[in-house]
Image (cartoon, rainbow, N blue to C red):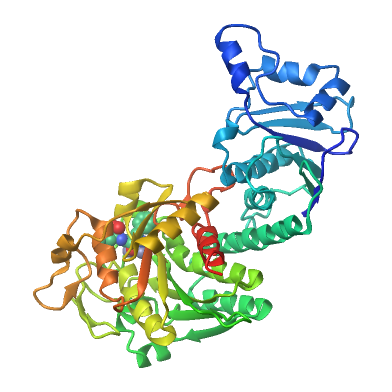
Amino acid sequence: MKFTLSSMITSDAENDLLAFGLFKSKAEKKKSNAKEKATCQFESSDSVNELDKQLNNHLIKSATDEGFCAEENQTFVTSSLGISKPKIIALMGLGDHHLQSVDLFRRFGGETFKIAQKKRAKKISLCIPPKTTIPLFDVVQAITEGFILASYSFDRYHTKSVKENHVKEVVIHLLEKPTPDQKLALKRAENIASSVCYARDLINEGPMELNPQAFAKHAIEVAQSCDLDVSVLDEKKLKKEKMHLMLAVGSAAEPASPPRLIRLHYKPKKNSKRVIVLVGKGVTFDSGGLDIKPADGMLDMKTDMSGAAAVFGTMRAIAKLQPDVEVVGYMGCVENGVGPHAYHPGDIIKSRNGITIEIGNTDAEGRLVLADCLDYAQERDKPDTIIDVATLTGACMIALGPYTAGLFSNNDALGDALRQSGKTVGESFWRLPLLPELKDMLKSPLADMKNVGERWGGSITAALFLEEFIKPGTDWAHLDIAGPASTKKAQSYIPVGGAGFAVRTLVDYIMGQN
Ligand code: BES
Ligand code: ZN
Ligand code: ZN
């Protein structure tokens, strides 16, 4: 798909699909409430009016007759029956222009792709509405991202009915002459969206294919093509590093799928004042271990490496965007299997930093992997800020539902910045408290700590467990993405399956630290 920018659309431009983003009209809404027949219930534009004229005033009339009033997500699609140059015309509702947001334009891009795909359109034009007040750089980036993200499909295992993407050319029409800067927004969107799609590929891949070793191969490949430093700690090095918690989780899956700690390092050309470290939970399959999960709880557990996939996607995007801040991404990859070498409930294991842990439940494995990885990362890279990303607890999904991630932080400014980035990119985070009074739940009679608390506040006790491994003075945030990491119901630009959640938030946050 090739993306370009242009100024105002002319109705004689050849297009398979011409999509207009439109705001609803407040004044006309009043009229219709008063039961007067409204002629046009949305804020039309010169281009729409011009096309309407060519179509003998049928475009606006039939849209209005069908009740189209540019409500958010409302669409009106019609064929021009060969009367005008564009073959299919789509009017896309963007709601009230006072409430416009960047994500609205991302959804505009996503919905336009879906119509294009249905109509087998090759050449598509999208036009933004006259009352657009969001900076055009952000609008261009969002539309392009939405379009690419919606076009994603994981089809490498389809041998019969392969879904073809017909789209070849996409032109975004602004209402003014595009600037070189806005053209950079296209490139930025392509870099980010392709990295999200790569993360989705990793999540959607089966656990036999994507074990920790295979994950490491992907990282090595990306490092070579994007100019990142890469290093991989195999099981021997992990032993040397005394990462006994991570090794315990992975012991049942050895020797078929031994654990790997992957490190990707982005060093900017200019000297960076800060180091940001990302750590992702990369449990390539979570059977629960000896505390085995029931079948329906285990079904989606190939997605338990979504945190590591998010770190992977973020590092790929950062390498392409080249900010002036140093970023290191760690992926703690391990399979939580069952077998004669499995770790047990009741085992007492010494973590890398010396804290002893009594295993209360082998299914609370993510925090064990992260604990050792967080400790290693802090010692090696001495970060100012460390952010971990993990499908850590079912409890977080119970609390916030399937579309929102839990956000914990020991620093309010960091928490606020991440939430704001999430808002900008259309990823939902909700701040949860690190309640000190719940720490007692992690007390063990036999060791320094247990790896599980009680039933209540499960996502909080998991976060409190991780906090024990954060060195004083380090700003830390923990993103529990158990809910939104993968989706069962397609959303505007998120197809069913791995979502690549948190890549866009982390990229936005890091780019803001320049
Ligand atoms: N990977 C799961 C968390 C999870 C559940 C992610 C559902 C996505 C969807 C994690 O390792 C786990 O099993 N956590 C347990 C913890 C419990 C044993 C304290 C949980 O949430 O039930
Ligand atoms: Zn688990
Ligand atoms: Zn897990």
317 on left or right of 280: right
The residue at 56%/63% (across/down) is 199
Quarter of the picture holding the C terminus: bottom right
Q: In the rendered image of this protein, does residue 114 appear above or below residue 233? A: above
| Towards the viewer: 310 or 438 | 438
Q: Farthest bottom residue?
A: 240
Q: Classify residue 297 as left or right of residue 355.
A: right
Residue at 49%, 79% (x, y): give it. Answer: 262
Q: Position of residue 66 (x, y in %)?
A: 66, 17
Residue 291 appears in the picture as rendered: no
Q: Position of residue 198 (x, y in %)?
A: 60, 63
Residue nearest the viewer, comparing 265 with 204: 265
Residue 114: image quadrant is: top right
Q: Quadrant of the N terminus?
A: bottom right
Q: Quarter of the image holding residue 316?
A: bottom right
In terms of image quadrants, where is residue 260? bottom left
- Above-or-below relation of 69 to 482: above
**Residue 360 at x, y = what percent?**
19, 68
Vertical arrangement, residue 103 with respect to residue 363, above or below: above
Query: For the point 62% across and 73% down, which residue is it?
Result: 319
Furthest residue in direction left, as rendered: 445
Pinpoint residue 493: horizontal percent, then vertical percent: 59, 46
Where ligand 2 lies, by quadrant? bottom left
User: Does residue 214 show up?
Assistant: yes
Q: In this view, does 229 lie to the left or right of 129?
A: left
Viewer-proximal residue among 351 and 415: 415
